[in-house]
Amino acid sequence: MTIGAPIDRIDGRLKVTGEARYAADFAVPNPLYGHLVTSTIGLGRITGIDDAAARKVPGVRAIYHHANPLPIAETSAFFGAGGRSQQSWQPFAEPDVRFYGETVALIVAETVLAAREAAKLLAFSYEAEEPAAVFDAAGTEAEELPDRSLSSGDIDAAMEGAAQVLDEEYDTSANTHNAMELFATTGHWQGQELTVYVPSQWVKGFQAGLAVELGIPDDRIRVVSPYVGGGFGGKGSLYTWTSLVALASRALGRPVKLYVTREQGFTVVSYRAETRQSFRLGAAADGRFTGFEHRGRELSSRADTYVVNGAEAAARMYHADAVRTGVTCVHADRQTPGFMRAPAETPYFFALESGVDEMARKLNMDPVELRRINDIDAEPVDGVPYTSRSLMECYDAAGEAFGWADYDPTIGAFTDGDDLVGWGCATAAYPTQMSPCSVRVHLDITGKAKVMVASHDLGTGAYTVLAQAAANALGVPVDSVSVELGDTRLPPGTIAGGSVSTASNVSVIEIACTSILERLGTTAGAMNPEEAFGNFGQSAIEEYAEWVPPAAGEGAGKSLYNGRVRIVGGAEEKYVAFAFGAEYAEVRINRYTREIRVPRLIGAFAAGRIMNEKTARSQYLGGMIWGLGHALLEKTEIDPRTGAVMNDNISEYLMPVNADVQDLRAILVPETDTKVNPAGIKGIGEIGIVGTAAAIANAVHHATGIRVRKLPIRIEDIMEI
């Protein structure tokens, strides 16, 4: 059975009743409250600070900035260079301002209101310069990254010999994390021991990074994050203010709690950077792709080279006689971007899947059939076989549910009253990735079991899925298993990113449970706890286990304890591992107002063994909804004159709601993969978003005949000329 039972979330009642404690919910004795102050220029330096009025606010205890800094021992390395921090510099290190909204001060007071009032009164004088904050601004610096490219075959000859060639550019906009749970940090010292409560996708990495920045051993730091109210990359690396809160707490002798406002969350943390992509695709008359060339330009900060380079995944999707990819990092006056749900695939598959649809038009072919013609068993760059590939099974399942057999490719063929109706489809894919993981499993004579691992639940159902894994492996009921997550006192687990959590955690849980049964002399099918423990001579047993994917290499398990994680998978030397899906979209566009609606989104996905049908379907649906937002709504609007974010709130930063799609379905296609990992699991947290934007854009073209090659698609993009 590849699809597990749809068991309700075991933490569901805690969440709906408010009993689940998120990072900001933990009570500490007699806390102080911090508030960040951010820059109001996009580039320059601070020339003066007037804090007289701010210090007069009753309850203000301290004001920290570059002229009164906190003693950070050493900056933890940038995560993109193998470290743990979101950026490669610390606030308050110098008077320079790198981007609009950078942290320039921390105020600590007796109350939240006092800290915020003082922040309004703290006055900075600046020597401002004109920032280069967007692609077209003078002063950006392009860094070519030739070591992050793919090449096979003669691309120029492949294009010259093609019957049809597509050569277009596609743009995607900046997007900002707006999780329901705001960023927050609490620092609490008890003697020489520090406890930090912080929403984290990687508590062990946060612990290690804090140890570097505070200059103390990591065993004196405990990081706690049992629940995360939405992360998907935004809470995966150490934030710049976390050490400041800890240091302020130590200096003032009291716990300090910091709440980052929604507005500040647009600049003091990471985001999905805008991209500009050039895409060339050549095809023979029968539809076989002869050449594939995909190059991207991605925005990053001045200091850090961060690119997602999604062309590497795109290049492995279909047959091609020749392949060439490349990526350029464009350094600008902005904060460092970072991971955001399917960080590489989301922007780059918009170009890939829009381009395939455009080629189908050139060839007068059905876009599904064009993909079928170019379906492959081994990726085209190095000829490495897939562990499994159920792409066309996904197209067939979703297409049947959608009614694709009635597709008429004629532009404007479908209408309904004043609505122009369009249909589109696109491939979704995401690399199957894993990392080393360790776990402790405890079982007692009553049949109660406990799973302990410093992994995380972003709201995706990890507590439930890991309980199911242990219950299945031990042969006990799910409701007899409890799970502890998100605490550095537990065995180090995976980072909750890259869709690695379930595959990695279940693989090691099954190892630990197998060891327990072997020591008890029983099997899961014959498990009788009272009898087994009677023969064993003890009333409880606990097993520690580690699992290291072979590709992770020697020492990867030990590195977990140093706050380092080696994520492997996707395109490896022996196999290429991906989960696949197919998404179909229907759009309705008012012929007069050009208002775009998406009444139907249907996707089918194959991802190996599914642990829980209900939580998996929820993940797919959530990804598709986010994809709708990526296609039509979400854009972080940057003022090119100042570098300021103009829509830094969730009133003007538009996101989809329930009414934005009426018929939303995710079909789970059964798939067995015995090569990908011991558990046979592929990640599902990110794939749902990948194909949605292209499917919608392709449907917009089918309805109107207007091809939009930039996201988000707005009314003005489809106005008739």
Image (tube, helix red, strand yellow):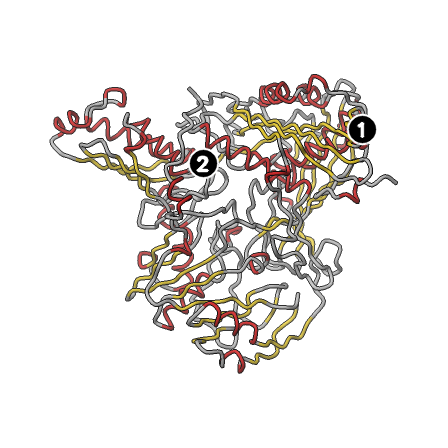
Numbered-mark total: 2
Quadrant containing the C terminus in the rendered view: top right
Question: Which image quadrant is residue 658 in?
Answer: top right
| Residue mark closest to the camera, 2 vs 1 | 2
Of callouts 2 and 1, which one flags the residue occurring earlier in the amino acid sequence?
1
**Residue 45, x across and y down, in percent:** 62, 72
- Secondary structure at badge 2 equals strand
Residue 500 horizontal side relative to residue 328, left or right: left
User: Residue visible at 15% across and 29% down?
Assistant: 533
Q: For residue 190, what is the image quadrant? A: bottom left
Q: Position of residue 148 (x, y in %)?
A: 61, 42
Q: Quadrant of residue 469?
A: top left
551 displayed left or right of 318: left
Which sits in the foreground, 152 or 296? Answer: 296
What numbered label is drawn on residue 343?
Answer: none
Mark number displayed over residue 434 = 2
Left of 530 or right of it: where is 504? right
Q: CA distance from mark 2 to mark 1?
A: 40 Å
Q: Please state the horizontal and vertical placement of residue 675, each as a whole percent of the image.
A: 45, 24
Q: Which mark is residue 160?
A: 1
357 or 75, which lies in front?
357
Where residue 601 appears, x then y in whole percent?
63, 30
Q: Is residue 163 visible?
A: no
The residue type indicated by label 2 comes to: Met
Determine whether the residue tagged by mark 1 lies in a helix, strand or loop: helix
Pointer 2 local density, CA inside 10 Å: few below 14, some 14–19, many at least 20: many
Q: Is residue 21 above or below residue 521?
A: below
Residue for point 51% across, 73% down: 65
The amino acid marked with disc number 1 is Glu
Please say whether residue 700 is visible from this viewpoint: yes
In the rendered image, the quadrant that contains the N terminus is top left
